[in-house]
Amino acid sequence: MRTEDMITSLDQLSDDELMERLRQVRHNREVARPAAARKTAKVEARQSRVKHSTAEKLLAGLSDAERQKLIDQYSQ
């Protein structure tokens, strides 16, 4: 909530004005914050790389028979 949302007394507003004010407050709360979005994207990308590299290492260590068994198990 911003200070400008508290300037007009709620008792002085009509029902339509109250609904509009509520929509504005909700919108302000949900406005995209670019810095937070970038940080979240970086963290997700980093986690994704770690998961992929870990999975690739595990699969590289399997023999052909073990790999085929794993493929058969997940294709059912």
Image: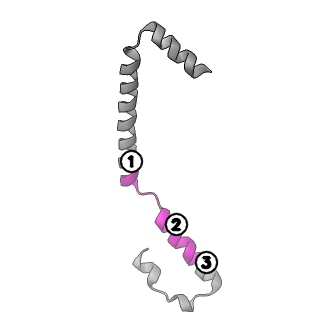
Q: Residue at x 37, y 53 (%)?
A: 36
Amino acid type at circle 1 is Thr
| Residue positioned most to the top | 64
The C terminus lies in which quarter of the figure?
top right
Position of residue 24 measured from the top left corner of the image (x, y, whole percent): 53, 72
Q: Tell me the CA gap for discs 1 and 2.
A: 21 Å
The N terminus lies in which quarter of the figure?
bottom left
With respect to residue 72, does 14 lie above or below? below
Among the 4 quarters of the image, the one containing residue 2: bottom left
Among the 4 quarters of the image, the one containing residue 71: top right
Mark 1 — residue? 40
Nearest the camera: 44 or 8?
44
With respect to residue 62, does 21 lie above or below? below
Mark 2 — residue? 27
With respect to residue 67, does 3 lie above or below? below
Mark 3 falls on what kind of element? helix
Mark 3 — residue? 19
**Dominant secondary structure, magenta:** helix
Amino acid type at circle 3 is Met
| Residue positioned most to the right | 16
Position of residue 28 measured from the top left corner of the image (x, y, whole percent): 48, 67
